Image (cartoon, grey):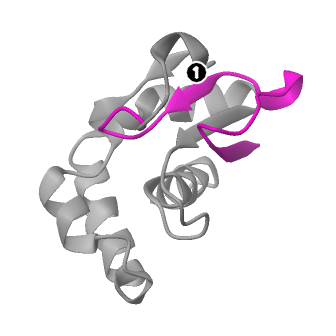
Amino acid sequence: MIRIKRVYDQSEPDDGPRFLVDRLWPRGMKKENLQMDEWLKEVAPSDALRSWFGHDAAKWEEFCSRYAAELEANSEAWWPILNMARKQNITLLYSAHDIEHNNAVAIRSFIEKKLDGNS
């Protein structure tokens, strides 16, 4: 199972490995206070895509499409997530306020398709 949580949410024992998937460090979060296993900056959307999207829900479908194309071109960035998700529960951490339209939701969907064998 791939879970997603805001970085400000408390960790739980069944989270499994926890990966921060934002390019920028979360505001107000001290590095020593964030329980995570790895910060995967390179799996985050490019600065250009992130700026274009601007967390505008109306752009969500197009964002997911463009982001998937970026991810396909950068498999080494998401491969650790896929490999770990094949073995155990993992948690993707993000800092956006919108819990439905953020890169962690998009990454989870992308990885789940890979796990199901759909490219």
Q: Nearer the viewer, residue 8 or 103?
A: 8
- For the residue pair 29 and 4, the one nearer the viewer reads as 29
Badge 1 is on which residue? Answer: 34
Residue 54 lies left or right of residue 86; in this view the side is left
Tell me residue 26's x, y (percent).
42, 36
Residue 60: x, y in percent?
41, 79
> Please, which residue is most extreme toward the top here?
32
Please state the horizontal and vertical placement of residue 69, each as a whole percent of the image: 26, 61
> Which of the 4 quarters of the picture holds residue 90?
top right
Q: Residue furthest right?
A: 13
Query: For the magenta stretch, what is the residue range?
Result: 1-26
Frontmost residue, 29 versus 21: 29
Image side of residue 90 versus residue 119, left or right: right
Quarter of the image for residue 13 reads top right
- Which residue shows up at 47% across the image and 25% down it? 80
The image shows residue 119, relative to residue 26, as above or below, that is below
